[in-house]
Image: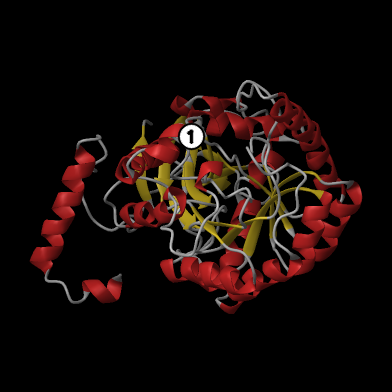
């Protein structure tokens, strides 16, 4: 994009940007100024308590804090987020004009930042345009580590077609989800290589594949295995050639073990893993992005008995996952996987981790640990600098909160408790 823009006059650039800002203004998304998000003037923060994202204690009297005796923590990170699908219903996502979805995603991006999440790892969907708009300061939102389209086998968890569209013939146009960049269907090593390389060409910071079924899948069973080891290895090799990694949607032990053998670096979900598989993850240094799927008030609602039963199994597995991840010292990070209109529960989802560990240990999984997972993108990371920590040379993402982070995380449920939100040294909220 920078190379292309070098050939465009300044007047054309400003005219096009004005049109974009005008479009977003209709949704109340236009910022007060349009410029790249650069660090602002130095801000002295004094007289607060510090959680640095790594050490599981609070430090008192660190002079990076604003007066008032409040706590400062790193900006939060959601390692399993779907930027384009978090704020709309499933029927809207599959049927409405893609422009509407992008505008709704832009609105949700602003809300995400106001919840204290300064960075998200997008693990499936057309997020490249929104990422560019946020990074250029057109709208407010979190940093986005985009995976691009979910790469799925035919009949896999990322195949969103209806049965009446089968069989697909060579001359058929792409289905809506594929054309919109939500998913990319691939069968066999050559197709997997092509689809992976396409997402890398678009700017993917990591690649997402579906290696098993889902709770609400209409066609693929939860326990189904998806992609052969050779197909997985192909996408791993293509990503590795560009200095990045593959993450995989999968729940079961058999699926997780196949992923690990193929070189997948991050397991998304994985709540049905047995203890031997968790040990295997630890032994191989595989990351685990765990979501607090607890079949509670924030969970998706199902009427299909099969989906209800699967959801219960996953909820039971979630409690084991937190226990075994700690017991076997697996590298793991917090994610939500919020879909279809549940974005407002993002902060509440993080509070649930405090049921299984200390509040600071839970915060660590959404700050320092999450930053380590994002660092796997290597040279494909869209941003220079450490994330999830408060340290010299790190990106200045800070939250000043009203609340005792050592005592609990309930303050996350109310955004009024976030008194200051800083991203990259710029303040996006200041109610001090």
Residue 29 lies, with reference to residue 389, above or below; the image says above
Looking at the picture, how far across and down is residue 389, in whole percent?
Answer: 57, 53
Residue 88 visible within the image: no
Colour scheme of the rendered structure:
secondary structure
Asked if residue 322 lies left or right of residue 135, the reply is right
| Of 217 and 419, the residue lying toward us | 217
Residue 54 visible within the image: yes
Residue at mark 1: 90
Residue 412 lies, with reference to residue 360, above or below; the image says above
Question: Which residue is depicted at the point 64% across and 72% down?
Answer: 189
Q: The C terminus is located in which quarter?
A: top left
Question: Which residue is depicted at the point 30% across and 70% down?
Answer: 1
Mark 1 burial class by Cα count in 10 Å: few <14, some 14-19, many 20+: few
Asked if residue 420 lies left or right of residue 15, the reply is right
Question: Which residue is depicted at the point 44% across and 25% down?
Answer: 416
Question: Which residue is depicted at the point 78% across and 54% down?
Answer: 255
Looking at the picture, how far across and down is residue 333, in whole percent?
Answer: 67, 49
Say what secondary structure mark 1 lies in: helix
Residue 42: image quadrant is bottom left
């Amino acid at each position: 994009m920078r190379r292309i823009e070098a050939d465009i006059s300044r007047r054309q650039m400003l005219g096009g940007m004005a049109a974009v800002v005008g479009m977003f203004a209709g949704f109340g998304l236009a910022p007060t100024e349009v410029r790249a998000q650069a660090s602002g003037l130095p801000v002295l923060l004094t007289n607060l308590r510090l959680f640095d994202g790594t050490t599981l204690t609070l430090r008192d009297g660190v002079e990076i804090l604003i007066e008032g005796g409040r706590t400062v923590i790193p900006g939060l990170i959601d390692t399993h987020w779907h930027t384009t699908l978090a704020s709309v219903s499933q029927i809207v996502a599959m049927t409405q004009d893609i422009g509407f979805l992008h505008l709704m995603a832009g609105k949700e991006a602003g809300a995400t930042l106001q919840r204290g999440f300064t960075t998200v790892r997008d693990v499936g969907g057309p997020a490249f345009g929104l990422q560019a708009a946020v990074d250029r300061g057109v709208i407010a939102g979190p940093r986005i580590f985009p995976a691009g389209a979910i790469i799925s086998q035919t009949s896999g968890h990322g195949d969103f077609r209806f049965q009446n569209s089968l069989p697909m013939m060579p001359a058929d146009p792409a289905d809506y989800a594929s054309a919109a960049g939500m998913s990319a269907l691939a069968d066999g090593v050559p197709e997997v290589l092509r689809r992976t390389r396409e997402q890398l060409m678009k700017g993917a910071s990591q690649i997402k594949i579906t290696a098993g079924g889902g709770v609400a899948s209409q066609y693929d069973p939860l326990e189904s295995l998806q992609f052969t080891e050779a197909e997985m290895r192909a996408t791993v090799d293509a990503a590795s050639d560009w200095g990045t990694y593959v993450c995989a949607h999968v729940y079961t032990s058999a699926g997780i073990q196949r992923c690990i053998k193929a070189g997948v670096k991050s397991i998304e979900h994985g709540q049905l893993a047995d203890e031997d598989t968790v040990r295997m993850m630890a032994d191989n240094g595989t990351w685990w992005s765990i979501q607090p799927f607890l079949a509670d008030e924030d969970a998706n609602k199902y009427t299909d008995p099969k989906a209800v039963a699967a959801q219960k199994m996953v909820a039971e597995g979630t409690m084991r996952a937190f226990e075994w991840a700690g017991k076997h010292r697996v590298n793991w990070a917090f994610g939500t996987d919020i879909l279809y209109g549940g974005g407002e529960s993002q902060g509440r989802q993080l509070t649930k981790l405090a049921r299984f560990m200390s509040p600071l240990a839970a915060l660590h999984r959404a700050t320092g640990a999450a930053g380590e997972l994002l660092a796997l993108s290597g040279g494909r990371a869209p941003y220079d600098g450490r994330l999830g920590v408060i340290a010299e040379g790190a990106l200045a993402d800070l939250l000043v909160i009203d609340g005792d982070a050592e005592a609990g995380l309930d303050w996350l449920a109310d955004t009024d408790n976030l008194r200051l939100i800083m991203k990259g040294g710029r303040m996006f909220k200041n109610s001090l």
